[in-house]
Amino acid sequence: MSDLKSQLSEAVEAAFAGLGLPAELGRVTVSDRPDLADFQSNGALAAAKRVGKNPREIAAAVAERLSGDPRLATVEIAGPGFINLKLSDAALTDRARAIAADPRLGAETVAQPRRVLVDYGGPNVAKPMHVGHLRASIIGESIKRIYRFRGDAVKGDAHFGDWGYQMGLLIGAVMDEHPAIAAAVERLNAGIEPPGAAGAAAFNTVTLADLDRLYPEAAAKGKADTDYRDRARRITAALQDRKPGYHALWQRFRDVTQVALERDFHALGVDFDLWKGESDVEDLIDPMVAELDAKGLLVDDQGARIIRVVRDGDKKELPPLLVVSSEGSAMYGTTDLATILDRKREFAPNLVIYCVDQRQADHFEIVFRAAYLAGYALEGELNHVGFGTMNGTDGKPFKTREGGVLKLNDMIEMTRAKARERLHEAGLGENLTPEDFEDIAGKVAVAALKFADLQNFRGTSYVFDLDRFTSFEGKTGPYLLYQAVRIKSVLRRAAAEGFGAEGAAAGPITVAEPAERELTLTLDAFETALAEAYDRYAPNALAEHAYRLSQAFSKFYAGCPILQAEPQVRASRLALAGATLAQLERALDLLGIAVPERM
Ligand code: ARG
């Protein structure tokens, strides 16, 4: 059963068509006067213009045709010719029952599932993360879940930045600090020691803390000192040529970083299917460059090799894709182009979604155009889904108190601490074991961070305000968790009193009261919200839906007693509450937010 909005659109479209008018004018929208109607169609106004008639007359003729429809309680003409539709209780009852019985809670799947790859997160070895990575992770995880729920075959890839100049810097810095490691690297490089032998043990003493400490120093030195920079470049080039000592040490850097990152991302409810690194496509680069050359796409430019991507009608001039630098190295964009090839071979996606900071918009436009020119993807298959920044109160991209870039772990810890405070303030979680309390504080923290981000359209920048994000009041993640947990507790109490467990044995639903009508209409709007989130890469549509749903539940809970009602009404309301919980939990899950059992 499709949602009520589509059902009514179909009915009104048929009425328009029956009058010889263009059917699409009949499309209905949610009423902007919920006190007067549930849905409305404004098509009579446009139709009147086309056929030179009075819009109210047309509206009246459409209303006449709709008059026998049992789903409609009233059809009224308002103002210059709006058609206002109010659903019958019977139609709402049917829809509420269908949603409650539907494992998908009223959401449809796409007609033609695609293969979709979401490239998001994009953390780097050693280089610290910044807010761009945080937002990429939060938004990308949600988009991945939304696409999967809609029925596409989806893979999420972290596209780990593990192959650039920063690796050469770091290898040099670690060798400077640890003579034993330096010696082992040299022995391996010279082939005196076979790979995998004793030297590797020395490498295992390198920790993530070492890398975190050494990288900023090395990066600063590399900027100030040309010799130091040149050495780092040489090491990078040798690493990319698979020099065994560098390669083995690099492997250690990559491993310790990935383990820590996976743990931190997991704490944030972000889990990648693939941790492919930039290094994974290294072998594809030489043959790719040869092929690009054979296709006549490469142009020599002062010793470098580039692909020109300008098109007629461009508003600004895009620089070319730098494929091979004058020093002979592959660049960031070269890796991205090779990754497109790799993904085509491994997964053959029809759609690749790059969830990356808006500041990289030009980079992606250039890479995509080059890929289309090379025939590595079809026009439109590659999509950059950009976003604004999370700012500090100074209006600039958020930094930690020490002025440094953000560390995921610190960010989560800081939010968790605030969440604990908030729980204590609200008198929540008091009778729980310390482990359960911690689990809840973690979920509240994740909900706070993610909902604060996802409630804005991704293009919008917003200000980091932990006090507001973690509040149990207002449009926040913690508020939504609280609402969901409250429904759980009502259902638990009902089950304890033998009134049907978790809504499953409850029902059937009968919709009668205004608050029940409103709640059902809100449940019905899930499909529209999900479709918008999917089509526009806009999880904020779902965030808005989750918020509205919990508000509609609040009104229902205040206006319609559940446990005290007489048995049939109680059973109906329990089932309605159960469906609301299931849909709210699903919507939150699609935002990457998990709901605790209690708090
Ligand atoms: N590692 C990159 C950075 O830190 C982001 C990677 C984004 N994805 C991509 N395919 N380029 O900026």
Image (spheres, helix red, strand yellow):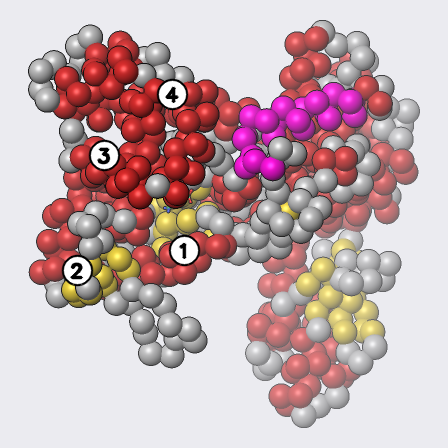
Q: Mark 3 points at which residue?
A: 235
Rounded to the nearest angstrom, the CA distance separating label 3 from label 2 is: 21 Å
Image: 370 above or below 346: below
Q: Is the magenta stretch mostly helix, strand or loop?
A: helix
Please tell me whether mark 3 or mark 4 is closer to you in this view: 3
Q: Name the foreground residue: 339 vs 207.
A: 207
- Quadrant of ligand 1: it is top left
The answer to which of marks 2 and 4 sits earlier in the sequence is 4
> Which quadrant of the figure has residue 589?
top right
- Image mark for residue 236: none
Question: Secondary structure beneath disc 3?
Answer: helix
Distance in Å between CA atoms under marks 1 and 3: 34 Å
* Residue hosting label 2: 303
The mark closer to the camera, 2 or 1, is: 2
Answer yes or no: do the residues labelled 2 and 1 have beta carbons within 8 Å? no
Which residue reaches farthest bottom? Answer: 52
Mark in front: 1 vs 3: 3
Q: Determine whether the beta carbon of the residue marked 2 sits less than 8 angstroms from the nearest atom of ligand 1.
A: no
Quarter-wise, where is residue 87 in the image?
Answer: bottom right
Q: Which amino acid does label 1 sit on?
A: Asn
Which circle's residue, 3 or 4, is located before the other in the chain?
3
Q: Is mark 2 on a helix, strand or loop?
A: loop
Q: Mark 1 points at which residue?
A: 383
What residue range appears in magenta? 403-423
Front: mark 2 or 4: 2
Residue tagged by mark 4? Answer: 256
